[in-house]
Image (cartoon, grey):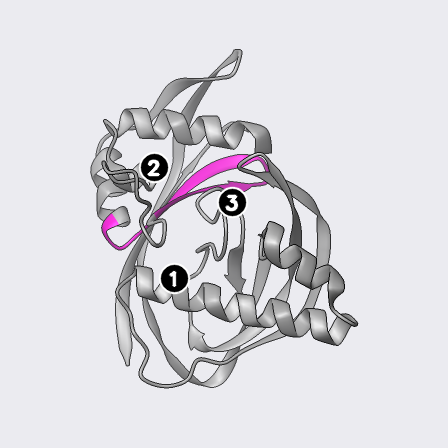
């Protein structure tokens, strides 16, 4: 099967820190008038299964990625809007739009596996971190991470309304811990590396926990 997804990426000038990204997200939520797509919560408090608007950092410069209906909402927000000023903690951040890119990607099975880089991925929670530490060796740990990554790919697809009729395969080629990142007040191990899968995935999307805030971003190579 093959499903076409619309994507839109708005890049801004000026630089912010990793710790300021959540505040930048807050400013975007305020600009949207509280549109649930921008904060990934519904009025009843439940989360969307997959964030359709994601906030990224590239060399310290912020960008926002919209996927599917998120792309439409983002396009509407920045139709004729060149930039904005917001408060990030104690400082004012004045920024202009440096570029807007819109494209369409097919999510589909491919005859040969596609390789991706994944950056600052958060596969473990408090519960499975104990299982990860208790694993007998690197092969067992990589097998566990591979299973989690496959689940993340399927969660993305389900969140976008895509259901595969064939078996999705995923293989981690290399993966290294890059330290810890704080998520909801808990320090979690982050990983970066390469993986391959028999599914073509859109460029720049995030996989796993905190994918709306620059975690688990993938780049096709």
Report the mark closest to the observer, 2 or 3. Answer: 2
The residue labelled by disc 2 is 39
Q: What secondary structure predominates along the stretch shown in magenta?
A: strand
In which quarter of the view is residue 135 placed?
A: bottom right
- Position of residue 63 measured from the top left corner of the image (x, y, whole percent): 44, 39
Where disc 1 sits, the SS reads helix
* Count of all numbered marks drawn on residues in the image: 3
**Residue 114 versus residue 183 in the image, above or below:** below
Q: Residue at x 43, y 76 (%)?
A: 199
**Residue topped by disc 3:** 214
N-term-proximal mark, 2 vs 3: 2
Q: Are marks 2 and 3 in contact (CB under 8 Å)?
A: no
Question: Looking at the image, which residue is at 26% across and 68% down?
Answer: 4
Give the image location of residue 66, x and y in percent. 33, 48
- Residue placed under numbered mark 1 in the picture: 156
Which residue occupies the foreground of this view, 173 or 65? 173
Q: CA distance from mark 3 to mark 1?
A: 15 Å
Is the N terminus in the top left, top right, bottom left or bottom right quadrant?
Answer: bottom left
Q: Which mark is residue 22?
A: none
Vertical comparison of 69 with 132: above or below:
above
**Image quarter of the C terminus:** bottom right
| Residue placed furthest toward the right | 137
Question: Which class describes the residues within 10 Å of circle 3: few (<14), some (14-19), or many (20+)?
Answer: many
Residue 67 on the magenta span = yes
**What is the span of residues highlighted in magenta in the rendered image?**
53-69
């Amino acid at each position: 099967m093959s499903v076409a997804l619309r994507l839109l990426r708005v890049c801004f000038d000026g630089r912010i820190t990793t710790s300021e990204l959540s505040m930048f997200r807050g400013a975007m939520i305020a600009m949207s008038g509280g549109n649930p797509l921008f904060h990934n919560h519904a009025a009843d408090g439940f989360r969307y299964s997959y964030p359709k608007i994601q906030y990224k950092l590239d060399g310290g410069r912020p960008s926002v990625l919209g996927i599917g209906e998120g792309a439409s909402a983002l396009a509407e927000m920045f139709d004729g809007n060149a930039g904005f000023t917001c408060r990030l903690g104690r400082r004012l951040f004045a920024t202009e739009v440096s570029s807007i890119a819109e494209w369409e990607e097919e999510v589909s099975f491919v005859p040969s596996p596609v390789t991706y880089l994944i950056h600052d991925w958060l596969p473990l929670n408090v519960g499975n971190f104990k299982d990860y530490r208790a694993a007998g060796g690197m092969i067992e740990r990589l097998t566990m991470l591979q299973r989690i990554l496959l689940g993340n790919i399927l969660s993305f697809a389900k969140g976008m309304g895509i259901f595969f009729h064939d078996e999705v395969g995923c293989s981690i080629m290399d993966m290294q811990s890059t330290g810890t990142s704080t998520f909801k007040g808990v320090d979690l191990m982050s990983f970066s590396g390469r993986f391959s899968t028999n599914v073509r995935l859109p460029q720049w999307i995030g996989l796993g926990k905190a994918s709306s805030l620059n975690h688990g971003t993938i780049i096709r190579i």
